Structures are given as structure tokens and as C-alpha cells.
Amino acid sequence: MPISRHRFIDTHGVEHNVMVVADRILDGDGEPVGTTGFYIDLSDTLAEAERDMVGQLLPELIEARAVIEQAKGVLMRMYRISAEQAFQVLRWRSQETNIKLRVLAERLITELPTIPPASPATVAAFDHILLNLHEHIGRG
């Protein structure tokens, strides 16, 4: 019994993914003259499977993206480069070491505590900026 999958659009413009389960009808000489069988609409099943997969992958993708963004921020501050340049640095290191970019980003964030702390003057300057941000909002 042959089984095949097809996609079609019904008269209302709705797309359907179907599986066709059919058997050939043969004449007295064994030549095919038709088919008999049925369609199984897989649209809801496929949509549900897609939603499940996205639901499983989305939190992981968001977490991976967050750590990459953190690593980019560190590189931007340390090297005084743009977000795109920081991403290119991460991508370069990933390609050169054959390690996934997300894994490198995670390791960079993990290693940050090993860097000596900022000088008191740097922390004081940052504190001043942080405490006075509200005065600069709207002024560009």
C-alpha cells in the first residue's frame, strides 16, 4: 500500500499537509486502472509538532543570545569597539578555535572575575554617570 505526502490549498485558501494512503486497483491483466484509499490531514499535527519544537528551543536560544550579548558588551567596553565589531571578534575566535560562539561567550563571562578590578577612580567615574543618567535623558 503506497503512502505519500502532499501539500494543497483548499477552496478557502487554507493550506493542508496530507498523507495519502492508497492502493492501486488493477484490471484483469494486472494493469493499474485507479486507486482506492484515503487522505489524512496532518496540518494540525505538524503545526503542533512545530510549536512544541519552538517551545523547547526558544528558551535555549534566548539564553544563548543573552550570553553572547553579554560577551559583546564586555568586548565593546574593553576594546572600545562597536557591537558589530565585537560580534566579529567572537565569530573569529569561534572559527579559529572550532568552538561554538555561544560556548566561547559563556567562557568569557565565566572568566571575567579573574580580571583585576577597575581602579577606584574608574569606579567613581562610573558611579557618577550611573547616578546622574536621569539628567541626561532626552538630551541625546
Image: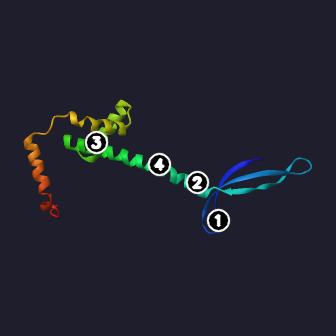
Residue 28 in picture, x, y percent from top left: 92, 50
Q: Which residue is mark 4?
A: 56
Residue nearest the viewer, comparing 5 with 64: 64
Q: Residue at x 37, y 44 (%)?
A: 64
Furthest residue toward left:
121
Marks 2/1 in contact by CB < 8 Å: the verdict is no
SS at mark 4 in the image: helix
Residue 94 in picture, x, y percent from top left: 35, 35
Residue 46, numbered label: 2
Which quadrant of the figure has residue 36?
Answer: bottom right
Q: Residue at x 48, y 51 (%)?
A: 54
Query: In whole angstroms, how far apart are the C-alphas of marks 2 and 3?
Result: 37 Å
Which of label 4 and label 1 is nearer to you? 4
76 displayed left or right of 25: left
**Sequence order check, earlier mark of 2 and 3:** 2
Query: In whole angstroms, how far apart are the C-alphas of marks 1 and 3?
Result: 49 Å
Q: Which residue is mark 3?
A: 71
Q: Which residue is mark 1?
A: 10
Amino acid type at mark 3: Ala
Query: In whole angstroms, how far apart are the C-alphas of marks 2 and 1?
Result: 17 Å
**Sequence order check, earlier mark of 2 and 4:** 2
Q: Residue at x 25, y 45 (%)?
A: 73
Amino acid type at mark 1: Asp
The residue carrying pointer 1 sits among few (fewer than 14), some (14 to 19) or many (20 or more) residues within 10 Å by Cα, namely few
SS at mark 3 in the image: helix
The residue carrying pointer 2 sits among few (fewer than 14), some (14 to 19) or many (20 or more) residues within 10 Å by Cα, namely few
